[in-house]
Amino acid sequence: MVEATGGTTSQRSGRLPYPGSCFLCGRSGGPERVAEAGYVGRACVCGTIYIDPVPEPTASSPTDDAHLDSYYALPAALRFEWAARFVPSGRFLEVGCGSGQLIGRALDLGFDAEAVEPNAACAEWVRRRYGIEVEEALIEESTLPSGRFDLIFHVDLLSHFPDPIRALEAMARRLRPGGFMCFEVGLFAGLDPRWYPWVGRPRFPAHRWFYDEASLEQVLDRAGFELVEIETFAIAPSTVISAALRRLLPAHLEAVPAAPTESDGLPARGSAIHRAYARAHYLLRYRLGALIAFPGPRTAFVAARRVEEPSP
């Protein structure tokens, strides 16, 4: 069992994340929903699932990535074109750019683009491929100037940040007045407990938090954002099929490790089986899941506007 440690101060809330408790409301001792590697995910009444105990800083790396490259590449156009509904042009920042699929879409649509990325290999790859500025850093430690961007996007990061409010505040500062932050996040909290055996590994300790819509809106509000729109995609079909395939083809589908990177440090492409599996998931998740409101887990596209601080 990893021992619990303290967290970092949230600049807006002025308090510490609670070791082994919900960072959003401070409660502890909620019912267990998932478990892995000596950690338990506990459900909080505010709508989060929180990791217990809090991982030590060395338990996971910010450059760890449990997704294949196809997770970013296949929906890239869908993700960016959804965000462009709110900000059709201007200066774009991607937080955690990976190998740069969203950057490519932004440049194709005429945006000026930059990125912040802690993985040195990914940062260098995107610099060379697209000729843009990429700061090799975490967003919480970024030196990017305030008020620089019209649109910020991140994919599947809100469950990873040690202090989500602090990370979102860092993004809010980089937005121009009225600027938008868009992102994708899984909604895995607040489910009927019978769903969790089907969902699969929680990927602890890289993942620390899971949300429902109510807790997600609270996090945004604490960080200085107003929720503008949320579009959800039902992932029950892909979840059930994935669980069945894990039982039928465990050797093939578990061949990708927890952090599947190529020898060059970029996200792995995987085998032909993995790529076919990823394409099937894409169709089930973003095409079928957009049409039919299945119960159970969902993924969400979220658009939030920076809230202006009142003048003194």
Image: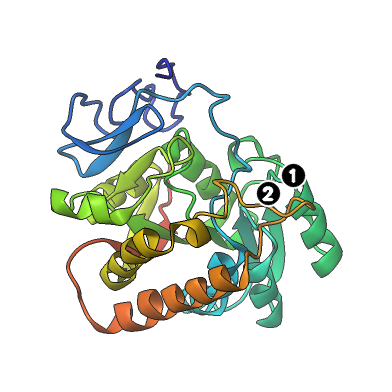
Determine whether the residue tagged by mark 2 lies in a helix, strand or loop: loop
| Picture residue at 36% right of the left edge, 78% below the top | 284
Res. 114 visible in picture: yes
| Three-letter code for the amino acid on which mark 2 is drawn | Glu
Q: Is residue 45 left or right of residue 267?
A: left
Question: Relative to residue 151, is residue 25 depicted above or below?
Answer: above
* Pointers 2 and 1 in contact (C-beta within 8 Å): yes
Task: Look at the image and tell me in which quarter the N terminus lies.
Answer: top left
Q: Between residue 153 and residue 2, name the one nearer to us.
A: 2
Q: Position of residue 290 (x, y in %)?
A: 31, 80
Label 2 neighbourhood size at 10 Å, few (<14), some (14-19), many (20+)? many
| Picture residue at 47% right of the left edge, 79% below the top | 85
Residue carrying label 1: 136
| Three-letter code for the amino acid on which mark 1 is drawn | Glu
Q: Position of residue 75 (x, y in %)?
A: 52, 75
Task: Kindly report the distance in space between the C-alpha atoms of the residues bearing marks 2 and 1.
Answer: 5 Å
Question: Relative to residue 17, is residue 209 depicted above or below?
Answer: below
Q: Is residue 67 left or right of residue 48?
A: right
Residue carrying label 2: 117
Comes first in the chain, label 2 or label 1: 2
| Picture residue at 80% right of the left edge, 62% below the top | 132
Q: Is residue 297 left or right of residue 175?
A: left
Label 1 neighbourhood size at 10 Å, few (<14), some (14-19), many (20+)? some
